[in-house]
Image: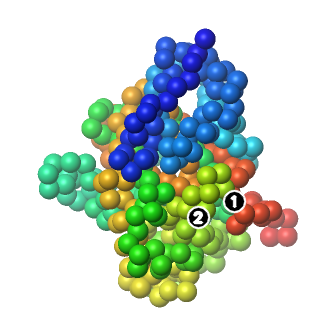
Amino acid sequence: MTVLSVAASTLTPSGLGRVVNAGEASAADFTAAAEARPDWLPGAMHAAHGLLLVRGLTDMANDAGLLVRLSRLFGTEVEDYRTTLTALNMVHPEVPEVFIVSNVPPVKRAPPALPDPPRTADGGLPVQFPHRRGWHTDQSYRRPPPDVSLFYCVKPAPKDQAQTLYADGTAAYETLPPDLKAKAENLVGIHAQPRTGRSESDARSGATPEPVEPHKRPQRQPVVRTHPVTGQKSLFLCEAGQMDWIGGPLEGMEQGPDGEGAKLLYALMSHYTQPELVYAHEWEAGDLIIYDNRCTIHSATWFDADKHERVMWRTTIRGNPGAEYADEAPSWIPRAAE
Ligand SMILES: O=C(O)CCC(=O)C(=O)O
Ligand SMILES: [Fe+2]
C-alpha cells in the first residue's frame, strides 16, 4: 500500500513548499493513493503556501494520463490546450491537457538568457528581481487566471542549469513594509499576453499600439489576492514579461516603463523575490512540482540548449479563482459576436 506523507520542514524559511514522500510507489500507485484521499494533496499544498515537490515518479513519463488524473484533484477544469488557441506543436500529441516545455522539436522553446552578471557577488544563483528576470504566475493575462499548475520533469538539463525558481507570495504579502502594504492593498495590475504589442520594448518604440482582438486584450487583476481556500492574502504580480506597458502596469498610476506605476511594481517584485522567499529547484527525471498560481510566482533559468535536451510537461487547472471572479466567462475564448 502506498502511504502518503509530507516532510515536516519547508523548502524556504518563510514556509514555502514541502516534499511529499512517494516511497517506492510507481506513478500509477501514487496517483491511485492520491485519488483515494482526494483532499490530501490539495490540503498539503495549501499548508505549504502553495508548493509541493514529489520525487521519484519516473515511470509517469510513460503515461502522461497520470499527470492529468493528478491534476483533476486540484480543480474541476484541466485545460485542454486544443481548445485554448495554443500552438499545437507545444501540445502533447496524445494527451491534449499536457503542454510541453522543451527545446526539442517540434516545441523548440528557447530558454531565458543568463542573468547579467551570471552569478551573485558570492557566487550564487541570482534569484532576486531585477537581477533575475522572468518572474510570473501562469496565464495572468487571462480572467479568471488558472488556480494551479503541475510541472513534471521527463528529461532534465544537467545540474546547475535550468532550475525553476518559486517565490512565496503569502510571505511576501505578510512581510511587506507598512508603506508598501498600504500602497498595494487596493491596487490593480494590468496583465498582457506576450506578443500582443504591449511589451516594454513596444512601449519604448513609441509606435502606435496595434488594436488587439477582444480575447487577447490585457486583463485587470488585484495585486493583493485573498486565497479562496486558506483565506490568506498574497501578492499577485508579474514583472515585465506579462504586464501591459502601454496602459499599465498599475491602474490609476503613471503609465509606461519609466512611470510611477513601473517604479512601484518593481519595488514590489524586488521584495517578493528576496532570497529568503525563494526556492530554487534542481530538476531530476521523475520530479513533479505542484504550484498554486494564486499565491506563488516562478521563473525559469538558463541552460545550454545547444548542448542539452530538456523536456517538461505542464498542466493548468481552474475552478476556484475566488469571489473576485464569480461567474465570469473566460476572457480568452472568442465569443460569437467578435
Ligand atoms: O521551464 C521552466 O522552468 C518554467 C516554465 C514555465 O514557467 C511554465 O511552463 O509555466
Ligand atoms: Fe510559468
Q: How is this picture coloured?
A: rainbow
Identify which residue is drawn at 14% across, 56% down. 121
Viewer-proximal residue among 2 and 148: 2
Q: From this view, report whether residue 328 is shown above or below residue 59.
A: below
Precedes in sequence: disc 1 or disc 2: 2
Q: Secondary structure at mark 1?
A: loop
Identify which residue is drawn at 50% across, 70% down. 243
Q: From this view, report whether residue 30 is shown above or below residue 148.
A: above
Residue bearing the label numbered 1: 322
Residue 311 horizontal side relative to residue 157, left or right: right
The residue positioned farthest toward the right in the image shown: 336
| Amino acid type at mark 1 | Gly
Residue bearing the label numbered 2: 225
Viewer-proximal residue among 113 and 26: 26
Question: In the rendering, at what x and y percent does residue 143 appear?
Answer: 68, 63
| Amino acid type at mark 2 | Arg
